[in-house]
Amino acid sequence: MIKKNKTTPITEQNRTLCELKNTKGMVVGQDRIERFQAAFRGEVIQPGDSGYETARKIWNASIDKHPGIIARCSGVADVVAAVNFARENELLVAVRGGGHNVSGRALCDDGIVIDLSGMKGIRVDAKDHTARVQAGATLRDVDRETHVFGLAVPAGVISKTGIGGLALGGGVGWLVRKYGLTCDNVFSFDIVTADGKPRVASADENEDLFWALRGGGGNFGVVTSFEFRVHPRGLWSYIRETVRWKFSDFIVILHSRHQRS
């Protein structure tokens, strides 16, 4: 179990600026937050907690938003609890996977961040050529597990990118010409919708939702895991991972090839 964060004193001015507020600007009572925290298995981080400043940082350092609460989920039950808490209190919601989105959609001011970054479980079925990946995993995490079997998910090119945002937004990478976009290789999604119910979206179940999630973005619920089709890595993937060139050497090679041609 993840330990609850200890709080440290903050000034009254900072408390006012960073309090959890609903979409109408009304402050959510501390008693409601405490009830939510008591039922939450993961870590609930509030302004003034020792880990707050670190928890609200994402890859794009120019994004400076101050959530009223950060709910770092340990599993699907926590996601359900966070979604219900947000709905019942009319909160602005942001969902964080890898936190790599340039526009800073993983954060919001005054509302709740449903943080999936601790949910990184990955299971590869080499026989069926599938991989079940939780939404907090990065491309580095996915590659590490699939490459053991000589397989790969067609994904992006930056190892710190979160698989969730990439797959929901489309996903272009090294294998796109051969195997298509990342979203083209999703068999199913596990998702918690706004009513707080866990659902499965696939070609056979909740088909309209499945269609929308494959490249339509993240506004249809909180996806907690993906089932991907995986493919043989191929020679190019092996070369890309094992061969490292200095930029100066690369220029020499290009120049010599140009002279021969």
Image (spheres, rainbow, N blue to C red):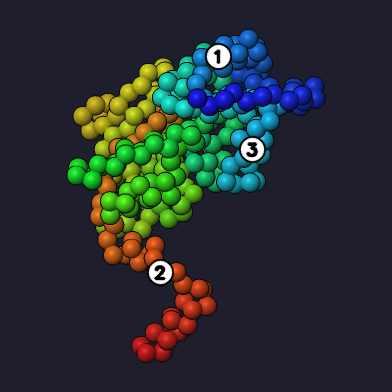
Where does label 2 land, which residue?
243
SS under mark 3: helix
Where does label 1 land, which residue?
38
Relative to 174, is 10 above or below? above
User: Crowding near pointer 1: few (<14 within 10 Å), some, many (20+)?
Assistant: few
Q: Mark 1 vs mark 3: which is more N-terminal?
A: 1
SS under mark 2: loop
Whether residue 103 can be seen here: yes
Question: Alpha carbon of mark 1 to alpha carbon of mark 3: how far?
Answer: 23 Å
Where does label 3 land, which residue?
54
User: Crowding near pointer 3: few (<14 within 10 Å), some, many (20+)?
Assistant: few
Kind of residue indicated by mark 3: Thr
x, y (%) of residue 63? 63, 42
Q: Mark 2 vs mark 1: which is more N-terminal?
A: 1
Please identify the quarter of the rendering in which residue 108 is found.
top right
Relative to 167, is 157 above or below? below
x, y (%) of residue 64? 66, 39
Q: Residue at x 41, y 17 (%)?
A: 195
Q: Residue at x 68, y 27 (%)?
A: 49
Q: Residue at x 33, y 43 (%)?
A: 183
Residue 53 located left or right of residue 139: right
Image quarter where the C terminus lies is bottom left
x, y (%) of residue 51? 65, 32
Kind of residue indicated by mark 1: Ala
Kind of residue indicated by mark 2: Val
What is the number of callouts on the image? 3
